[in-house]
């Protein structure tokens, strides 16, 4: 099981952009993100706010639909937490 880190909201946005998401439109601090072949996301970007591990997990697993291996590679750049 992956132990999720907390991340600043800007870091989470950059992670999503690395998956191909782009900002389609913005109203206030809420942005609609879209990516080819992935579900659209509504992301509330509050600069400097920390996204807790549970929220990061929800975004990556449930909303984006990544597998555990894909999440490990995205967050740490390797296939399994013990490698490296």
Image (cartoon, rainbow, N blue to C red):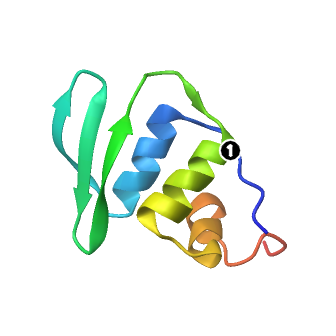
Neighbourhood count class around disc 1 (C-alpha, 10 Å): few under 14, some 14–19, many 20 upward: some
Whether 25 is drawn above or below 71: the answer is: above
> Residue 47, position in %: x, y?
44, 22
Residue 50, by quadrant, is top right
> Residue 25, position in %: x, y?
15, 39
Whether 63 is drawn above or below 68: the answer is: above
| Residue at figure coordinates x 44%, y 59% from the top left | 63
| Residue at figure coordinates x 24%, y 21% from the top left | 28
Image quarter where the C terminus lies is bottom right
Q: Secondary structure at mark 1?
A: helix
Whether 32 is drawn above or below 19: the answer is: above
| Farthest-out residue, left | 25
The image shows a total of numbered marks equal to 1
| Residue at figure coordinates x 59%, y 67% from the top left | 71
**Which residue is the site of mark 1?**
53
Image quarter where the N terminus lies is bottom right
- Could you tell whether 6 is left or right of 25 in the image? right
- Could you tell whether 46 is left or right of 6 in the image? left
> Residue 68, position in %: x, y?
64, 73
């Amino acid at each position: 099981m992956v132990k999720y880190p907390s991340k600043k909201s800007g870091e989470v946005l950059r992670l999503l952009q690395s998956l191909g998401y782009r900002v389609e439109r913005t109203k206030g601090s809420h942005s609609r993100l879209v990516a080819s072949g992935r579900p659209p996301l509504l992301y509330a970007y509050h600069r400097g706010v920390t996204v807790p591990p549970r929220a990061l997990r929800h975004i990556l697993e449930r909303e984006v639909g990544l597998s555990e291996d894909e999440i490990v590679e995205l967050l740490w750049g390797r296939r399994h937490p013990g490698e490296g």
